[in-house]
Image: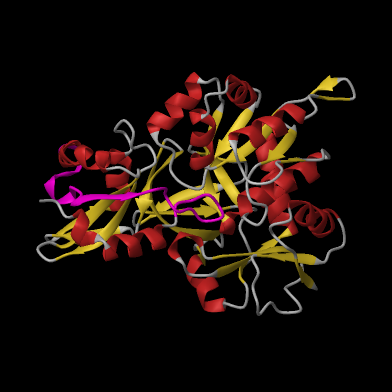
Amino acid sequence: MRVEPVDAADARAVLRGLRGAVLGAGPAIALGGRADLPAEVPAGTAVVVTTSGSTGVPKSVALSRSALTSSALAAADRLGEGAWLLALPAGYIAGVQVLVRSLVAGHEPAILAGSFSAHAFTAAASAMASSDGGRRIPIYTSLVPAQLQTLLDDPDPATARALARFAAVLVGGQALAPALAERAAAAGARIVRTYGSSETAGGCVYDGVPLRGVGIRTVDGEVQLSGPTLADGYLEEPQRTAAAFVRDTGGTRWYRTGDAGIVVDGVLRVTGRLDNVIVSGGVNVSLDRVERIVRTLPGLESAVVVPVPDERWGQASVVVVATATDAGEALLPAIRDAVAAAAGKPARPRGILRVPQIPLLASGKPDRAALRTLAAAESDTSRDT
């Protein structure tokens, strides 16, 4: 099948491409600006999403029309049909799926104009039609936690009213801090935590419960997912595809997420990345767990924890906070005490790294690779004395 690159920054161009790739006869579209894109992709491919993600390692995920539509139909089965607002970048899978859900439901999506801001979101939400031929329909949107915080921090009451209009606000891309979830609930927002990736055609587990047709299991502590939403694999990378997508003895195909987690009574709880672990003083420390603990403290809902070398312990961690003042340093004793109480003394962060703002990827996730580089370069100034 022929594939054509589409400017991911142009949401309406992406929508036009998806209309042909998902509802029509093609061609497939490629998002992410891959320079060596082949002229042809496997039959059935609708979208190729290339992203470096938070690890900085590029990957081109080939998604079939069937996987995308299965995901959209399963979401509608869980939430109900309605109209969608695109507030995320259209070049990432969560943005793609907002558009696909709209196409499958037969509703033209609303698209936030320009860069994301509380004002732009409120304007876009307010402009959405609330009825279809006299029949009132629900409205939905997808956000990442940083966007949700931007909306909750806005003092204009119109923003809170706009957020509360949505029948559901899907929030994914990274863990949602409990304090942020509580603020959203207090503002009247109906938050649905989603879990998934490009390899699963976006979120396929809502509030810990898999969508229709999606299977979940853990193998040696790793979360694995199955079902009709799985990608075909990585474009022109058969070895990488074989390593990430495996079959069990019954022939079921599973995607190895690389995430640690547990399943209790059919509900998934993700505890962190299997590879986001450091060895500090001979003790394994999950930085995802440390980050979750830190984010429970007031004012640290968006803090990021990254590793740094340590002459004494081998590895340690620092807490990155967005502040232009020295005020953040006063939080270190409380941070270390909270982490020690919940995860043990070896897990205590060594210091605080202050930045004017947390650098973000285009997807809205923290740019952890950039933060690790910055933390390593400035670790001497953030040492715990």
Report the colour scheme: secondary structure
Q: Residue at x 66, y 80 (%)?
A: 36
Q: Residue at x 51, y 36 (%)?
A: 150
Give how far across and how far down residue 13 sits, in percent: 79, 56
Q: Is residue 380 left or right of residue 226?
A: left
Q: Residue at x 66, y 57 (%)?
A: 91
- Start and end of the magenta stretch? 341-366
Do we see residue 275 in this rendering? no
Give how far across and how far down residue 60 sits, in percent: 60, 69
Give how far across and how far down residue 333 sits, in percent: 15, 39
Q: Is residue 151 left or right of residue 174?
A: right
Q: Residue at x 70, y 53 (%)?
A: 68
- In the rendered structure, does residue 344 fall within the stretch colored magenta? yes
- In the rendered structure, does residue 84 fall within the stretch colored magenta? no
Give how far across and how far down residue 319 sits, in percent: 28, 48
Q: Residue furthest right?
A: 133
